Amino acid sequence: MSFHENDIPFEKRLKEEMDLWLEEGIISREQKERLLARYEVLEEADETAGPGRLITTISMLGAVLVGAGIVLFIASNWAEVPRWGKLLMIFSSMLTCYGLGFYFGYEKKNYPTVGGALIFLGSIIFGAGIFLIAQIYHIFVHYPHLPLLWGLGILPLAYLFRFNNVMALAIVDLLVWVGTEASFWIPESAYFGNIMPYITLFLMTGITLWTIGLMHRRFVSLRDLSGPYIVIGMLTAYSMAYVLTFDIFRAKLGAAELAPFYIGIVGLFIISGAYAFRPGKQEKAWVPEAVALTVLLLIALLLAFFFAGTSGNGHAQITGGMFNLMTFTANIVFAVIIIGTIILGYIRRYPPYINIGLLFFVLDVFARYFDFFWKLLPRSLFFIIGGLMLLIGGVILENKRKKVLASFHILENE
Amino acid sequence: MKRKFIIIVLFQVMILVGIIAYRQYWVATGARVLLSTESADPRDIFRGDYVTLNYEISSLNHTVLGTEEKFRPKEHIYVVLEKDPDNIYKAVSVSRTRPAAGKFIQGRAGDELELSKLEVLLQDDAGKRQSFSPRWFSGVDKGDRAIFCIGEKNTVLQFYKEEILNKPKCNTGKSISGVVVDIRETKTRQLRVDYGIESYFVEEGKGKAIEAARNAKSLNVEVSLRKDGKGIITGLFLDNKLLR
């Protein structure tokens, strides 16, 4: 009998499963041994070959290092290498990586992981090439165009090969483009006024990326590529929402000059949302998710357009009133979305939601513990109430789980 | 699969070649102007392997700004250039709208500084009128008697109002007493402009020499101007010698 590489995880799962079968008396110990013997080759092969994930990680790290090396080499040997020589190096290294990557991964198919890493390296060199050419020819008139060209250039590659790492790189490039482009539009102003608009801008961008990810999940052919959108979108949106839980409601959080950005982002959100939540076979608990994403986007828009800042005269101390209400509300909203995301992750059995939710839960607890500015609630009370809410939530979830399992006639684990 | 892959890679190659072609077209069709540089803030002059260039036209003075027109930061503006006898282009006027003819460069408005210059005319006891430019002047009005303490290069170290019962003396400097005939304050403004040609990549180690030349004002930069006034650096001239 011949095996495929994909059978290795199956064998591991089978082993675990058979322990249960043995316990439940479905199979005897002897049968288990005989069954396992059938897959012995796989276990042996896995042990000698080394874990697959490790190979991927090593290949990727290798790709990044070689990429950085090529960039440094071209950038530092300024005097020695003539202009055409530098261009030749950029083009030849990029084409060699792509060529070898395709050959190993898709023509001969014997080194798919290394092939993928080489194609990823090719897309790094492509981006480095854009920046090096701009540097060689002193073209820095409007530098946000550089990350934009990079992102747009490698996006088709991500879609053709279903490469999550190339996809993630393209998304990060486009985020950098949004940020640098916005810096040309945001007017100069005092009191961090020219930093604040980024918070709402990236909050909206993150929410929209997340929704685009959900749209990808609805298409069978694009499902594999949803991960980078969802993870990067969530990380961006949550980081910005996290910033909003601090003492920052003093300056304006948006800029009228950024209106074209807001319109573009909201447009993308509406289109991707319409696809992500269209009738048909929906994901579990899609309604609260759709509502939460829309509400969050609306909050970001309201803050960007209508919040004028509570600081009247520079360093005046702000106590009570509107300012505290904003910070308080932001904290409540943030806590609700984090816990909601974790619950959604469990319901949908989608680990990124659980992991990112837990990450920001920990960050939030940390920040609130050390938060000297936020004196609305005595800290101890906040922690006790928060903890109680979680415990009660746990009891409710436990009960629900029992009922659900009972309805399927499944006994619980002791 | 293979065909699609080749098409995408060709697409990327085209992007890279496109950037070069675009630049070459710009240089070939653009108008060349020579701009002179000034010393820059020493704190961020030279970072890594590129030089920060600060042009004479990077800050526009009152005579160029002329009108009362205010420019918002980051606003697109057009600076009209004219050649001086040394072949260096100087700023002559600035506008929000694109000039119909002549050489002009497009930039973005930066911070506007308001500078004020005081001129106090004093008729001394000998009847001679002298003009001073103190940094500040208050408490003494037109027609009052005053005593000025004057340091080197005619700088006003101190001034006092002189009254019948109070005749102050200067601790340092030459003292001149007389009647204040006139107090004039002229306000000028200065606008910083960013043209997108403020950094230039150089060979490792060459930066220091260029930096020194720039500070000695012997560095000129050749810029190619596109039809819409956007500039791109095509060469650096150190003491009228092209740097490669």
Image: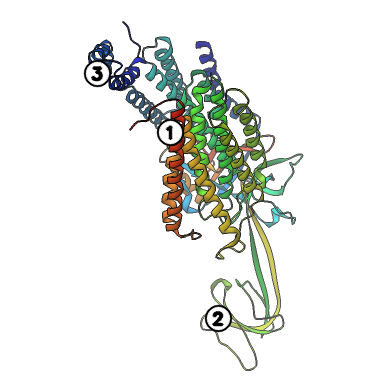
Image-quadrant location for residue A6: top left
**Marked residue chain, label 1:** A
How crowded is the residue under tag 3: few (<14 C-alpha within 10 Å), some, or many (20+)? few
Dividing the image into 4 quarters, which one contains the N terminus of chain A?
A: top left
Q: Nearer the viewer, mark 1 or mark 2?
A: 1
Residue at image coords 54%, 75%:
B151
Q: Nearer the viewer, residue A330 or A188?
A: A330
Residue picked out by circle 2: B174
Asked if B240 appears above or below A191 in the picture, the reply is above
Q: Which dot marks residue A48?
A: 3
Label 1: which residue?
A402
- Give above or below for A107 relative to A49: above
Dot 3: what SS?
helix
Q: Nearer the viewer, residue A408 or A349?
A: A408
Which amino acid lies under the numbered mark 1 shown in the image of this protein? Lys
Residue at (22%, 13%) from the top-left corner? A30
Whether residue B244 is visible? no
